[in-house]
Amino acid sequence: MTDDRIIFEKTGPHTGLIRLNRPERLNAIDMESMEALHRLLGRLSVDPDLRAVVLTGTGRAFSSGADLKAMDETPPGEVTIKTAHGQFQLFQDVTRRMVSSPVVYLAAINGIAVGVGAELSVASDIRIGTDASEVMLSEVKRGLFETNGVLHYLPRIVGHGRATQWLLTGERVKAATLLAAGFLSELVPADRLLPRAQELAEAIAANAPLSIRMLKHLLRRTWDVDLEAMMQYEVDGMMACLASEDVEEGVRAFVERRAPVWKGR
């Protein structure tokens, strides 16, 4: 499936790859790009076979952020307050679609990720990178503001102090710091980035779909509920798994020393 700005391809029976595809602009994101991504995420969320998707950029950047050149070329007065509000709600809905989807999203950060590009990586479930990976939440340098839930998720990922520094300075954060802060789960050589991301996607997709869906959902709620509530959710999750057909298949496959064939129910 191809849209000039956003490319999606299936990479396996249960995995896929999204490429931000404006390499001549370092994958800067304009409204057409965001609209295409929004539509694509909606389609992927209802694909019963899809379990894990890698998100990356074409060329040497993940994304240089919002297309400021396009913003500068927009005639004064052409974008009304009502129009701008609707556009930013679409930005927010991209994050909603990523975090609420049963699909696990892995960001393979192949270079600089700025502004909204960085925010898309924040919204992903897993992030890996290379020595060339950099994150820059530069909105304060442009008189802009964060979107895509970054003020909710970034402090939970790297801690309140680091998030505060990164956001208030708009500084470039290098790969080693991203790894040490837990923003990246691992660094790999550049030529191993996509293969490694795909390995992780395949490893996730090979597991029981019901278990994966509930894990993603509850991991997103870790900071929002107390211990007792989470332990009850864990019991509910275990009971749902025990009532599924897949638990029988998982046990049978273990005994028979073969790969399980999941039904997702």
Image (cartoon, rainbow, N blue to C red):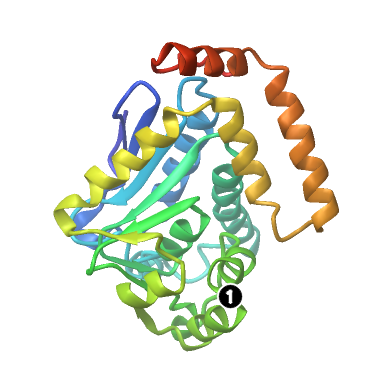
| Residue 206 shows up from this direction | yes
| Image quarter in which the N terminus is found | top left
Q: Nearer the viewer, residue 220 or 236?
A: 236
Where in the figure is residue 148, as x and y percent of width and height?
56, 59
Residue name at image x 52 percent, y 81 percent: 162
Task: Report the side of 132 relative to 226 (left or right).
Answer: left
**Tally of numbered discs:** 1
Residue name at image x 76 percent, y 58 percent: 224
Residue name at image x 61 percent, y 67 percent: 156
Task: Using the rendered view, name the quadrant where residue 238 is placed.
Answer: top right
- The amino acid type of the residue labelled 1 equals Gly
Q: Nearer the viewer, residue 76 or 35?
A: 35
Classed neighbour count for the residue bearing mark 1: other residues with Cα under 10 Å, few (<14), some (14–19), many (≥20): some
Secondary structure at badge 1 equals loop
Where in the figure is residue 203, as x and y percent of width and height?
38, 35
Where in the figure is residue 103, as x and y percent of width and height?
51, 35
Residue where numbered disc 1 is placed: 159
Q: Nearer the viewer, residue 214 or 8?
A: 214
Where in the figure is residue 168, as x and y percent of width and height?
53, 86
Q: Tell me: residue 14, above or below residue 109.
A: above
| Residue 28 shows up from this direction | no
Q: Residue extending furthest front?
A: 255
Task: Report the side of 136 relative to 61 (left or right).
Answer: right
| Image quarter in which the C terminus is found | top right
Task: Using the rendered view, name the quadrant where residue 59 is placed.
Answer: bottom left
Q: Tell me: residue 204, above or below residue 186.
A: above
Q: Tell me: residue 184, above or below residue 210.
A: below
